[in-house]
Amino acid sequence: MSFESLGLSAELLRAIAEQGYSQPTVIQRKAIPVVLAGKDVMAGAQTGTGKTAGFTLPLLQRLMQIASPKGHRPIRALVLTPTRELAAQVGESIATYGRHLPLRSAVVFGGVKINPQIDTLRRGVDILIATPGRLLDHAGQRTVDLSHVEILVLDEADRMLDMGFIHDIRKVLALLPERERRQNLLFSATFSDEIKSLADRLLNAPELVEAAPRNATAERIAQRVYPVDKARKRELLSHLICSHGWSQVLVFTRTKHGANRLSQQLQKDGIDSAAIHGNKSQGARTRALAGFKAGEVRVLVATDIAARGLDIDQLPHVVNFELPNVPEDYVHRIGRTGRAGREGEAISLVCVDEHKLLRDIERLLNCRLPQQQLPGFEPDPTIAAEPIRNGRGGDRPARGTVRRQGGGQRDKATGRTTGNAAKPRQQQKQENAQKTTARKRPAPIRRSEKPSLFGG
Ligand code: AMP
C-alpha cells in the first residue's frame, strides 16, 4: 500500500517523500483514513511504530480542509504529551510534515522561560503541542485560549496517567469545547482499565485501531539477559560496549543518582557518556540528547521518566542496567530500539535480587527471555538475593515536591496538592479498593516543570 492511496494531499505527499518514507507503517495505514473521515480514534501503538505521523498527517490535512475562522488565528488542534522531549519531537514532526502548508505550530513545555512562549501564542498558532503542566500555567495566566480546539490528541496516554497527570488532563478538558464538537484521538501503548475509563470520558464512538498486539514487544528486537553479580554490572557493561564496538547505547538505571554514578564510572573507563533524568535542567537534557543523537556521546544513561518518548533514529542498543520495577516499563524501554521496522538489540543485566522482576516481565511478555552467561562474569552462586530498594521505581518526585502521607504530594513552589492527599477520604478509599485489583503502577510523579515556552 502507498501513501497516495490513503487520500493524503499533494503537499503532504511531497513532505513524506522528502523524508524518504516509501510505505506507510501499519498504524499509519489503519489510522490515517479514519482520522481523515473525521472520526474519533483509540489507537494502540507504542513509540517506534510511526504513530506520530499516523496522527500528524491526517490532522494537518483536516485543518486545511476545515475553513479557519476569519480575523484571528485560534488554536485549532491541541496535542498533549507526557514529557518535554516527546512534545519537542512531535513539534518537529508537525513542522516537518507540514512544511508545505500555511499552518503555524508551537510547542510549550516547562523548564524553559515562559515569556517567549507567551509571545508566540500571542502571534497566533493553529496547532499547539504541550505538556499538561505548562499548558495549565498558560491557562492560569490567560495566555492561551483553547475554546476553538477542533482536534485533540492525547499522545502516550498511558504514560500520562503513570506520571500522575490525570487531574491536569481533566482541567485541560474543561477548557476545551465540549467533546461532541471536537475530534478526539487517543494513542496509548497499553490499555489498562484507567485508560479505558479516560477514553469513555474523552472519545465519541471511537474506532479502535492497533499497530501491534497490546503490550507486545517489537518483533525485530533481539532480547537477551546476562545474569551477573550486582557489583560487576558496570564492568560487564564496559566490556560489552568495548568488545562489540557499540557506538550508540541507551542505558536505563532505576534512579537518578544511579544514572549519574554509572555515567561517571563509564567516563573513567574511557567511554563517552552523559546522564539524563528529572533533576537535570532542560538545557542539560537537550544538550545530552543532541550529543547522543549526533554520535558525540556514546552512552546515554537515563531513568524511565527522562527517556519516555525519546525518538532516536536507528538506535541499535538498549541496555537495562537494572530491570524496571513495573514490567510495562520494560516494554517502553526496549521500544527505543527496533523502530519503524529496523532491527535492534535489548540487553538486560540481571543480578540475583532481580529474579522476581524478570519473572514479572516474562509473564507480561508471555515468553522466556534467552539468557547467556558471559565467561568471567558468571554470578557467584553463594550470593543471596536482597530486596530491591529505592521505592517503587523510576524517578522520584523532583526537588521542591514534598511527599505526603497517603501518597499525595505538595508542590513547594505552588502549594498545590496532588495525588491522594488532595482527595476526599471516601474517594481515596474507593480508589484504593480498585487499585488492589489493578496492575501495580509506579507512584504518581509530580510534574517537575517550572513555569515557561518554546517556539516551534
Ligand atoms: P514514532 O512511532 O512516531 O515515534 O516513529 C518512529 C520512527 O519511525 C521515527 O523516527 C519516524 O521518523 C519513523 N517513521 C515514521 N513513519 C515512517 C514510515 N512510513 N517509514 C519509515 N519510517 C517512518
Image: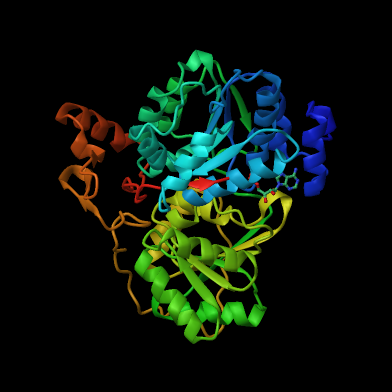
Nearer to us in this view, 336 or 322: 336
Q: Is residue 343 left or right of residue 430?
A: right
Examine the rendered structure and indicate whether residue 413 appears above or below residue 424: below
Q: Residue furthest top?
A: 180
Q: What scheme was used to colour the molecule?
A: rainbow
Q: From where the camera sits, is residue 31 visible?
A: no
- What's the residue at 40%, 78% (across, down)? 381
> What count of labels does the image hold?
0
How far from the left and from the top, in percent, is residue 389? Answer: 29, 63
Q: Nearer the viewer, residue 410 or 203?
A: 410
Locate residue 344 relative to residue 80 in the image: left or right.
right
Q: Residue at x 66, y 18 (%)?
A: 67
Q: Which quarter of the image is occupied by the N terminus? A: top right
Can residue 405 be seen? yes
Residue 259 vs residue 61: left or right?
left
Residue 100 point in image, percent of width and height = 76, 38
Q: Is residue 380 above or below residue 64?
A: below
Task: Report x, y in % for residue 142.
Answer: 37, 31
Examine the rendered structure and indicate whether residue 251 appears above or below residue 199.
Answer: below
Vertical order, 6 against 336 (above or below): above
Q: Nearer the viewer, residue 243 or 183?
A: 183
Q: Residue drawn 38% across and 32% down?
A: 139
Residue 298, located in which quarter of the rendered image? Answer: bottom right
Question: Where in the figure is residue 385, as x and y percent of width and height?
Answer: 33, 69
- Figure quadrant of the C terminus: top right
Q: Give the image quarter of residue 53.
A: top right
